[in-house]
Amino acid sequence: AFLLFKTSYLAGRGGSLTCFEAGLDSVPFAEAQMARARRHVPLLKVRVVPSILDFELLAPKSVDLFLSSHVIEHMPDPCWFLDGLKRVLKPGGLVFTEVPDQDPLGDRTFRRAGEIHLVFFNQKTFRNMMVTSGFQLLHIGSYQWGSVVRSLFKWPGPDQG
């Protein structure tokens, strides 16, 4: 699961965001975290969506920023997911992602640990998938000794790009 931030109230106010990632079994935990955060920051507008695949719960063009860390590589069809994401992102909306930088042969450690990646990415393949899906690359790079691809893309809107 993931959190979607309604960030328009932060624009120009010098505000900051903290992302609380909700797993499929940790939505109640994430909601409790958000309730505690709202006591300290009354204007905090964060919505917890139970599943990353529940796009029908979101209005079209309603999301300013999508944050994803180590999620997309677990999806059987990332391009289908990106199509749904484009529907809910506002034109100019941002997509920040992190995926493991690996190839299928180098993923044996993850498989032995029980963490099954359905899709394998490196910088080139991840960039190609995002650009082919219509997103504009703003930044892509590796961190943690080259083991993670961190990227920022912009959705220009259906009529741009």
Image: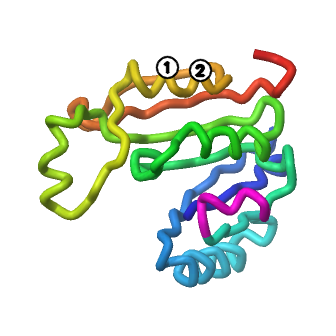
Question: 67 above or below 25?
Answer: above
Residue 144, percent across and down? 26, 37
Q: Which residues are magenta?
A: 51-57
Residues at circles 1 and 2 in contact by the CB criterion of under 8 Å: yes
Circle 1 sits in a helix, a strand or a loop, which is it? helix
Disc 2 marks which residue? 132
Going by the numbered disc 1, the residue's amino acid type is Asn
State how the image is colored. Answer: rainbow
Residues 139 and 85: in front is 85
Q: CA distance from mark 1 to mark 2?
A: 6 Å
Task: Indicate the quadrant where residue 11 lies.
Answer: top right
Going by the numbered disc 2, the residue's amino acid type is Thr
Label 1 crowding class (10 Å Cα cut-off): few <14, some 14-19, many 20+?
Answer: some
Disc 1 marks which residue? 128
Residue 12, percent across and down? 81, 39
Question: 40 above or below 141?
Answer: below
Instruction: Residue at the far top: name it.
Output: 161
Image point (62%, 59%), residue name: 53
Is 11 placed left or right of 81 in the picture?
right
Residue 107, percent across and down? 19, 43
Is 36 placed left or right of 140 in the picture?
right
Q: Is 9 a magenta residue?
A: no
Image point (82%, 39%), residue name: 90
Task: Indicate the quadrant where residue 152 lies.
Answer: top right
